[in-house]
Amino acid sequence: MSPTIPLRVLALSALAAPWYALGWALRIRRPDPWRRTVGLGLRGEGSKFALCAFGLALFPDGAGPSEVGIGQVESVAARRVQETLQEDPGERWMLSFGRALVSRRRSSAADVCLLRFDDGGALEGLDASFDPRVGGDSWTPGERAKVGGAIVAAHRATSALPEWDRPGALQARMRAELAAIPGVDALRLRRLGDRLLASTTLTVEWRERNDAERFGPPPFAARRGLGFGGMHLVARWIADRRALDLWANLHHAAFDGAPVQEWLSRLERRWGLADVPAFPADGGHDASRGFRCSAGPAERDLHLIADFIDLTPLHRWGREEGAPVVAALIWWLAREPEFAGRRFGVAVEVPASNGFARAVDLIGIRPADFSTPAAPADGFAEFARAFAQKAELARARRGPTFAAMRNAALLPAGLASTWIRAKGELAAATFGTIGVTMLRDAKVFVAPMADFGWPDGFLALGSTALPAEGGGSVTSVTVKGEAPAIAAYPAAIRRAVARCAESKAQ
């Protein structure tokens, strides 16, 4: 049951809404509805999403020493990441954390901060690589060491806080540590510390050999970044392949999946590939491995399951029916008891238009509305038409979900957050109870998940054509949500694929 909206919130909303609506109509105040929505509802550590580029050539043209150590990998990786960010300013964002809203703004500097953690996940050291074009050489080694020590102490003290509170607490603790150092210019050191906290962060892991563990997402919540930068990178050096896998963990208030995947694809072309791996075969990845991906008891208890599944029968069936693979997937999933009667919210890429930047929208659709128990497959043509129509409306920013996001954007952040949390049934009817998103060029796409709502979890799929070990192809499938709700999903997806394949054979 949804919580009751307090009378004072109702009264304030009634007073505020007309003025905000007038500002929208007059184009005086038009916050982006999508950015506003993710800033209100995806603030926790578990709400972040991730993407990966596999097998990068860290040393161009195979150059580099025959024996490579972890220090060399760290320094070269930090330098090359920084060069890439300098070339792609569109991937540089800083975050601001309000009481109810996380918002983003452009970062002028391509700073990279290398973080080192101990085996227990505690930060034990850092090295900064400042953008030389933006005053990166104005601090002495002594000043950097003092600030680094203060950040390490602050990071350790705040590592279990929820993500919406942690960056501000980390900054306050860092400043207090610096103020306690005698004989220094505390204000100057604070400026250095604040710049580091807003940097892109990078952690390097060393792997001696190539194995299936390589394809499992890192436990990002166990080794967190610095907070005000929206991107935390984990680089895995696969020593026997002389290749680097680069995982990007991203705050949704700053980044969306498609632009980041395009950035990773450009990075692959610029760096080149030292290794094109074969991905684990269907069922060959210790199937359905999962771990907790939220931070501390204050955040929603979210878990991630990652698997590789052969979706070839679904892909072929959808192509023959003239429908996208996502439509085919949710149609057949709805035949399984774990998904029966569910309303799916499917992510749709939205181009820039009407003064708004490129964004995402979600279309809510329930396959059960188009079929009957006696002939469950007969309604697919009508379902596919409805799916295509809803997607077209979403891309034009004329669908019901865009209207709902726009209405929330018309309210102050605190009021909007209260409304969204209180109207769970309305949100489920509009957006769905289970989310699905797909990036066709992604290798592994780690699902996002909101801080509330979506009781049935969120699925993310990558390319359907990943080369599998032993032949054939697989798709990376990840699902994020509360553990009891999502535990059986990989098995249900495999049953849905098998049912689809059986239908083709008949």
Image: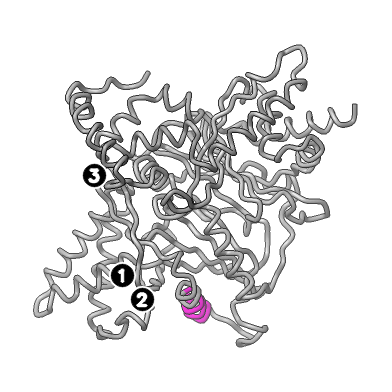
- Give the side of residue 322 with respect to residue 7, left or right: right
Residue 37 place in picture, x, y as percent: 38, 41
Q: Residue at x 52, y 59 (%)?
A: 260
Residue 472 place in picture, x, y as percent: 82, 51
Check disc 1 and give the amino acid type.
Answer: Leu
In the rendered image of this protein, does residue 261 appear above or below residue 327? below
Classed neighbour count for the residue bearing mark 2: other residues with Cα under 10 Å, few (<14), some (14–19), many (≥20):
some
Task: Read off the residue under disc 2.
Answer: 128
Task: Read off the residue under disc 3.
Answer: 99
**First along the sequence among labels 2 and 3:** 3
Tag 2's secondary structure?
strand
Q: Which stretch is magenta?
A: 72-81
Are discs 2 and 1 less than 8 Å apart at CB?
yes
Kindly report the distance in space between the C-alpha atoms of the residues bearing marks 2 and 3: 30 Å
- Give the side of residue 285 with respect to residue 432, left or right: right
**First along the sequence among labels 1 and 3:** 3
Which residue reaches farthest right?
506
Q: Residue at x 45, y 55 (%)?
A: 255
- Residue 388 among magenta residues: no
Nearer the observer, 501 or 115: 501
Q: Residue at x 78, y 40 (%)?
A: 319
